[in-house]
Amino acid sequence: MTGRTAITARMTARSDLRASLRDIRGEVRYDEPLARFTSMKIGGPADALVIPADEADLREALLAARAARVPVMVLGGTNVVVRDGGVAGVVLRLSGLKAIRPAGTHRLYAEAGGPFPTLAHAAKDAGLSGLEFACGIPGTVGGAVVMNAGTRDGEIADVIESLRLMTFEGDIEEIPASQLGFAYRESHLPPGVLVGCTVVLRPDDPAAIEGRMQAILEYRRETQPLHLPNAGCVFKNPPGQSAGRLIDELGLKGYRIGGVQVSERHANFMVNVGGGTAKDLTALIRHVGGRVERERGVTLEMEVRLVGRG
Ligand code: EPU
């Protein structure tokens, strides 16, 4: 394809997409910078950012993307870094799907787009224990499930009973936890968009749950750079070791490339100290990962996911 033909093809695809998305009841924004929707405050624009009003609207968006033959991605925004060139096709924010409701004995159903800590507080208020670890984890319920978010106090796979998923064709499937392939910071969900999950918890005294949550929050406040834009831990902990300690021992705290710096407080966090770009971040990840590999013989695996065009 010549340059001009490629541009014409792209413009046609965009006008097809606009036509397909015209019935969305939620929000649709074109060429929307994603930096404001990510915790790292980094990221180029989405061709179309869609915030569906509810599940039926989500179906509409998925069918529209299918009709326009463009890719679809869900953006939780926390454990993910959007590259500077932005994201092609439809980016979904599920902030319209955030209900939490009782779902039988010791169970709650949570839609995917609500904040994960809100689910932890709802469980505490209902006198249900098992999600205390979630109280300081930023991000959405859906993001937490996909990443199997957790700490040494627990992970979401411990309490998930089943998921509700919408296929890219718009059909709903209920999937039991046993089929989700959960591992450390990892899951294997079938293709589609996660719309909610049922968690099964244990009854306990809300005051006791609250006490444990406060202790977890306090530890986070003391050890993590919560005051600066970050994407959580950048690397997974290698088996039996701490990525943060390994990086710290190499004296890399405070090391900076452009606007992104290895946190002075916790070496497995990289923080945007102002004007940081995805290019800065990936260069810093390579530098830090390279030094740990060369000097400690440990290959660090990334926990943060990079998406979009370079
Ligand atoms: N450490 C250092 N220097 C550092 C950071 C840590 O020496 O700069 C040492 C600590 O002193 C401690 C050990 O390393 O002895 C472990 O540190 P920490 O307790 O902070 O836990 P972590 O393993 O680094 C994990 C999770 C965090 C979670 C915390 C708190 C991973 C990759 N990280 O961090 O999760 O918040 O425990 O429970 O599993 C995330 O996944 O995004 C995340 C932030």
Image (cartoon, grey):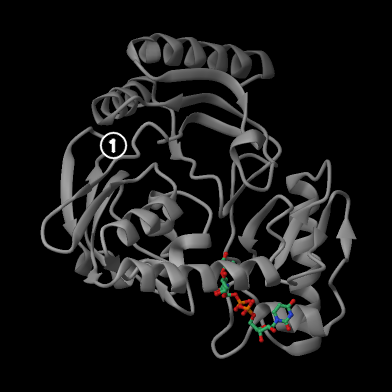
Badge 1 marks a residue whose secondary structure is: loop
Q: Residue at x 83, y 50 (%)?
A: 273
> In the rendered image, which quarter contains the C terminus?
top right
The answer to whether 233 appears left or right of 135 in the picture is right
The answer to whether 298 appears left or right of 304 in the picture is right
Query: Looking at the picture, how far across and down is residue 174, in whole percent?
Result: 16, 51
Q: Residue at x 53, y 73 (%)?
A: 215
The image quarter in which residue 175 lies: bottom left
Q: Which is more toward the observer, 9 or 183? A: 183
> In the rendered image, which quarter contains the N terminus?
top right
Instruction: Name the quadrant where ligand 1 sits.
Output: bottom right
The image quarter in which residue 210 lies: bottom left
**Viewer can see residue 267:** yes
Up-down relation of residue 20 to residue 110 (above or below): above
Q: Residue at x 78, y 74 (%)?
A: 290
Looking at this view, name the residue that lies furthest to the front.
207
**Viewer can see residue 181:** no
The answer to whether 310 appears left or right of 239 in the picture is right
Up-down relation of residue 212 to residue 135 (above or below): below
Query: Looking at the picture, how far across and down is residue 9, in whole percent?
Result: 54, 15
Query: Looking at the picture, how far across and down is residue 191, in whole percent?
Result: 30, 48
Query: Looking at the picture, how far across and down is residue 211, in whole percent?
Result: 45, 72
The image quarter in which residue 86 lies: top right
How crowded pointer 1 is (Cα within 10 Å; few <14, some 14-19, many 20+) is rated as some
Q: Residue at x 81, y 85 (%)?
A: 249
The residue beneath circle 1 is: 168
Q: Which is more toward the observer, 258 or 149? A: 149
**Kind of residue indicated by mark 1:** Phe
Up-down relation of residue 111 to residue 44 (above or below): below
Q: Which is more toward the observer, 302 or 41? A: 41
